[in-house]
Image (cartoon, rainbow, N blue to C red):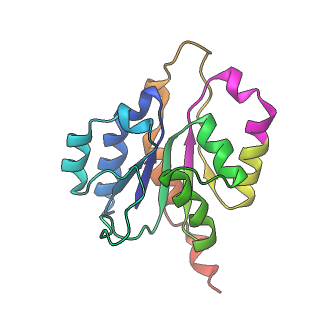
């Protein structure tokens, strides 16, 4: 499973999501947006997962440091990432992986984290609608007050794992 981490104040808590995924016997690799990387305790996450955090594309001939993903959780998913992803913009490794995940049929969940002013922008609602049409499972985070940050105590890391857990009806959807 990949966890894509964006630049947001709650990003430092991603270890909680990793722990919950590992408790459900998932192997976890972390992909950070370039700015998201600065919000993480790289050493702690790499120790916890056993893999390097990826943030940039590999060079030709470089080995793949992570196994292929069987699911992806985007947490926290920022306004910027949600809108670029829905528009098919692939200008970072994180967005490239998310854009390809759709075509590869990889189950993906996103836990938005943004403020109310950003959430009021019409592009955000269109982007969520597009992502849902693509089969992305969207979490239930309620945007926080602008310029207040916060919401870390309300950020539900476990929801990403719960959204990605197979449901009884999923086994009947085989092609």
Which residue is found at the position 63% from the left and 43% from the top?
82
Q: Quadrant of the C terminus?
A: bottom right
Which residue is found at the position 23% from the left and 49% from the top?
46
Which quadrant holds residue 118?
Answer: top right
Using the image, determine if residue 158 lies above or below residue 166: above
Residue 124 on the magenta span: yes
Name the residue furthest bottom: 175
Name the residue furthest front: 60
Residue 24 on image: x %, y % = 33, 59
Q: Nearer the viewer, residue 159 or 168?
A: 159
Using the image, determine if residue 150 lies above or below residue 46: above
Which quadrant holds residue 25?
Answer: bottom left
Which quadrant holds residue 104?
Answer: bottom right
Which residue is found at the position 33% from the left and 49% from the top?
18
Residue 76 on image: x %, y % = 49, 39
Residue 34 on image: x %, y % = 44, 41
Apparent side of residue 36 relative to residue 133 in the rendered image (left or right):
left
Magenta-drawn segment:
110-125
């Amino acid at each position: 499973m990949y966890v894509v981490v964006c630049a947001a104040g709650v990003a430092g808590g991603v270890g909680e999501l990793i722990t919950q995924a590992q408790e459900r016997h998932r192997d976890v690799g972390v992909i950070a947006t370039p700015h998201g990387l600065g919000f993480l305790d790289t050493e702690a996450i790499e120790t916890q997962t056993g893999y390097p955090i990826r943030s940039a594309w590999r060079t030709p001939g470089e080995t793949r440091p992570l196994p292929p993903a069987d699911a992806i959780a985007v947490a926290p998913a920022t306004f910027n990432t949600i809108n670029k992803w829905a528009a098919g913009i692939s200008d970072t490794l994180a967005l490239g992986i998310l854009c390809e995940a759709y075509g590869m049929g990889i189950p993906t969940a996103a836990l938005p984290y943004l403020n109310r002013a950003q959430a009021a922008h019409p592009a955000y609602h269109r982007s969520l609608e597009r992502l849902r049409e693509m089969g992305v499972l969207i979490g239930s985070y309620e945007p926080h007050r602008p310029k207040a940050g916060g919401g870390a105590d309300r950020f539900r890391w476990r929801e990403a794992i719960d959204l990605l857990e197979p449901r009884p009806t999923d086994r009947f959807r085989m092609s």
